[in-house]
Image (cartoon, rainbow, N blue to C red):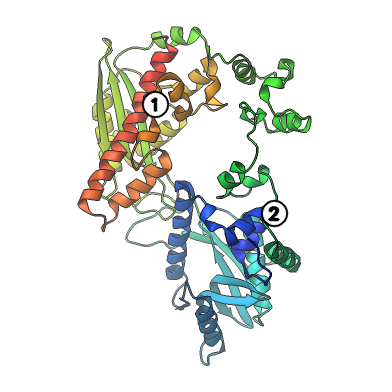
């Protein structure tokens, strides 16, 4: 599919084109090939929420509507700018120049012109934000509007919500006028280039590093499906080794099995290579010796958290991981298991009930087994700061934690893991019957967050909330039973 006429560009399309011209073409002509992940949806939702809040923080003004009708948005913007009387702050003002369309988050009147304020849900200024603002500034200035300054407003992670709906200070504004001025000179070239791209056929660009920089491309699976199948064990499964991987690829090594063993000096890489070559898993008997020394009862623990861009509960910060669910499998010396769980879908602050129920279940003795201890330990430390009356008892839990991740990385590898030690990559190699794909609604952490948000929404029907409750409990419980099976496998049982 192609277009012979000039196709309108937008800020987002130009940004897409700078990442990959094929992404630009697909986002224009083949949007049905786009895949939206829970993570990307969460980012989009957070951006919308922060944008809505910014309009409250920046004060009274005129919101230009017509989300689906750009012609009306352009007309309403023009009328507002040409109107007599006191100038108003404009929100979502629409502008067009040389078939490039943009909408400005905030256009604030100042002496001699306007200030442009772009609002982002990120926590700092990124390079691609500067590009974003340069495109907007170029279009707006070429319509005759004088821009005095260009600012980027982003979330201040040091902000602590005090409650009562007071979010003053959540956004911090940085002046990026100089940086944007330098980039603005490049915008005409980008526009000409990408208009030519959209007049032609789908660009023939293979997947590569551009697929994830600066964003994960929603067309990745579409593009990869049209490429020849690569080796079963590509050299890219060597994690935390960008320089080595790049060097091997530059030398023509695509298949890890063809890489000379002496090229790999990292013991983990050596194990991955050996297992890929032989097809046999690696299990170090020393793991059993280490784990058999653990006492009983054993507590296999997993948390689920929500991290709001805009804090919902007092004393929390933006993007802070607030725990709302835990699951725990308790194993006795005779091998018997009993599951305990906590889940709060009331929409109220869950943290105190979370902490109290956790302490009741974990008691004061016995190892607490987790997978990637920094996450659970971090949440427990935060709970201790929130609730000084429980601080000592909560912090004592950390002393009992045993992290299965480094133990597994050191002592186990299966070729099917393809370089990943995530619990979801390991589980099919030790307990294929415990399949995350069979879980309804919630099969990963991103879906768990979306399910939580849906469940606490006041308009969610009771029966749907009950279904989400079940799905969340099954998912979190699957993580803990997976750790039980992992320990059994490492111990040779």
The dot on residue 398 is 1
What x and y, as percent, mark residue 357?
24, 33
The answer to whether residue 475 is left or right of residue 122 is left
Name the element at disc 1.
Answer: helix
The answer to whether residue 255 is left or right of residue 37 is right
What x and y, as percent, mark residue 101?
60, 72
Of tags 2 and 1, the one toward the viewer is 2
Q: Which residue is the extreme one toward the left?
A: 462
Relative height, residue 287 to residue 232 (above, below): above
Q: Residues within 10 Å of mark 2 (few under 14, many from 20)?
A: some
Please say whether residue 400 is visible from this viewpoint. no
Q: Earlier in the sequence, mark 2 or mark 1?
A: 2
What x and y, as percent, mark residue 419?
57, 26
Check disc 2 and report the residue beneath it. Answer: 203
- 456 or 147, nearer to the observer: 456
What's the residue at 53%, 59% (across, down)? 120
- Residue 235, by quadrant, is top right
Please say whether residue 327 is visible from this viewpoint. yes
- Residue 110, by quadrant, is bottom right
The quarter of the rendered structure image containing the N terminus is bottom right
Relative height, residue 262 to residue 317 (above, below): above
The residues bearing labels 2 and 1 have C-alpha atoms spaced at a distance of 53 Å
Q: Which residue is the extreme one toward the right?
A: 251
The dot on residue 289 is none
What's the residue at 33%, 40% (across, down)? 440
């Amino acid at each position: 599919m192609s277009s012979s006429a000039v196709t309108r560009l937008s800020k987002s399309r130009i940004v897409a084109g700078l990442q990959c011209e094929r992404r630009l073409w697909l986002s224009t002509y083949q949007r049905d090939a786009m895949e939206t992940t829970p993570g990307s949806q969460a980012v989009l939702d957070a951006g919308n929420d922060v944008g809505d809040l910014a309009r409250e923080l920046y004060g009274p003004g005129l919101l230009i509507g017509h989300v689906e009708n750009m012609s009306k948005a352009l007309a309403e913007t023009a009328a507002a700018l040409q109107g007599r009387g006191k100038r108003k702050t404009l929100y979502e003002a629409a502008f067009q120049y040389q078939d490039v369309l943009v909408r400005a988050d905030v256009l604030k009147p100042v002496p001699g012109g306007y200030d442009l304020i772009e609002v982002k849900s990120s926590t700092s200024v990124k390079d691609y934000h500067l590009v974003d603002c340069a495109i907007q500034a170029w279009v707006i200035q070429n319509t005759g509007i004088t821009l005095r300054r260009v600012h980027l407003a982003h979330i201040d992670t040091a902000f602590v919500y005090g409650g009562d709906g007071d979010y003053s200070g959540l956004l911090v504004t940085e002046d990026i006028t100089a940086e944007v001025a330098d980039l603005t000179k490049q915008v005409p070239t980008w526009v000409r280039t990408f208009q030519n791209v959209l007049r032609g056929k789908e660009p023939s660009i293979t997947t590569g590093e551009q697929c994830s920089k600066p964003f994960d491309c929603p067309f990745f699976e579409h593009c990869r499906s049209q490429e020849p199948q690569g080796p079963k064990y590509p050299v890219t499964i060597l994690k935390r080794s960008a320089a080595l991987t790049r060097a091997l690829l530059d030398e023509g090594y695509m298949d890890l099995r063809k890489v000379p063993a002496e090229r790999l000096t990292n013991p983990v890489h050596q194990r991955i290579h050996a297992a890929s070559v032989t097809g046999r898993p690696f299990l170090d008997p020393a793991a059993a010796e280490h784990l058999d020394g653990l006492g009983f009862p054993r507590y296999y623990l997993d948390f689920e958290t929500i991290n709001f861009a805009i804090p919902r509960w007092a004393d929390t910060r933006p993007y802070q991981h607030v725990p709302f669910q835990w699951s725990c499998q308790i194993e006795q010396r005779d091998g018997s298991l009993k599951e305990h769980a906590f889940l709060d879908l009331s929409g109220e602050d869950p943290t105190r009930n979370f902490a109290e129920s956790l302490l009741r279940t974990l008691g004061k003795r016995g190892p607490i087994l987790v997978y990637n201890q920094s996450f659970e330990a971090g949440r427990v430390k935060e709970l201790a700061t929130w609730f000084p009356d429980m601080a000592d008892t909560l912090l004592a839990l950390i002393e009992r934690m045993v992290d299965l991740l480094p133990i597994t990385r050191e002592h186990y590898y299966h070729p099917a893991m393809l370089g990943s030690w995530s619990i979801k990559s390991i589980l099919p190699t030790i307990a294929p019957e415990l399949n995350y794909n069979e879980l309804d609604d919630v099969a990963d952490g991103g879906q768990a967050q979306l399910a939580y948000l849906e469940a606490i929404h006041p308009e969610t029907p009771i029966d749907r909330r009950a279904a989400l409750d079940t799905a969340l409990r099954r998912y979190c419980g699957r993580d803990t039973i997976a750790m039980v099976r992992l320990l059994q496998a490492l111990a040779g049982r």
